[in-house]
Image (tube, grey):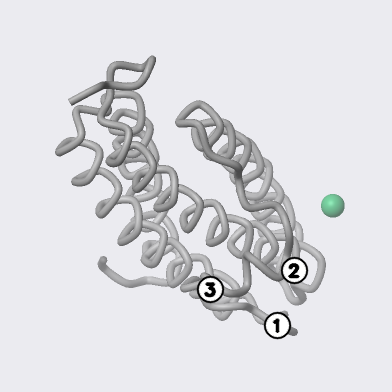
Amino acid sequence: MKLNSLGLDPQKTKELASQLNVLLANFQIYYQNLRGIHWNIKGKNFFDLHIKFEELYTNANVKVDEIAERVLTLGETPLHTFDDYVKVAKVPVGKNISKDENAVQLIVNSLTELLKIERQILNAASEADDEGTNSMMSDFISEQEKTVWMMNAWLGRSI
Ligand SMILES: [Fe+2]
């Protein structure tokens, strides 16, 4: 079989890029959820959470770019319109959330969905010998699992 210039199976590479596009779309929903709660949060935890949500959306913004550029590296076009994002969204859309516990729960629920997609990509990347995508996914997964722990701790729950 003829490999592409990355040394990878072209068909598997195309499939991985398409899964990364699904992750990209869902990350954009997560990013916008974070902007929403950064803006709309109310109550005694305002100052802490307003800053924490900014930290998270800044981090998500960097990851969105990394995912899109991985799609390009794999030879495909990253999804870049809101209508495409909404079509493949699995992350729940948060609207009019101003209560602190609901905002933090939205983060947990969003990350739970992102982790599912990332694990699927991780498995597919291993199967395709795509170490670049694989290591990106494992970095995302361990970091997000830690965030889920911290958000659950804030909520007074275990994972
Ligand atoms: Fe702001």
Front residue of this view, candidates 74 and 1: 1
Q: How packed is label 3: few (under 14 Cα within 10 Å), some, or many (20 or more)?
A: many
Whether label 1 lies within 8 Å of ligand 1 gets the answer no
Q: Amino acid at mark 1?
A: Lys
Residue placed under numbered mark 2 in the picture: 36
Q: Is residue 12 left or right of residue 14?
A: left
Front residue of this view, candidates 67 and 59: 67
Residue situated furthest front in the rendering: 1
Residue 82 percent location from the top left of the image:
73, 65
Q: CA distance from mark 3 to mark 1?
A: 10 Å
Residue placed under numbered mark 3 in the picture: 106
Asked if disc 3 and disc 1 are in contact, CB closer than 8 Å, the reply is no
Q: CA distance from mark 3 to mark 2?
A: 11 Å
Q: Amino acid at mark 2?
A: Gly
Q: Residue at x 53, y 61 (%)?
A: 26
Q: Earlier in the sequence, mark 1 or mark 2?
A: 2
Front residue of this view, candidates 20 and 152: 20
Residue placed under numbered mark 1 in the picture: 95
Front residue of this view, candidates 107 and 158: 107
Whether label 3 lies within 8 Å of ligand 1 gets the answer no
Residue 15 percent location from the top left of the image:
35, 48
Q: Is residue 93 above or below residue 61?
A: below
Q: Is residue 103 above or below residue 78?
A: below
Q: Of helix, strand and loop, which one carries label 1?
A: loop
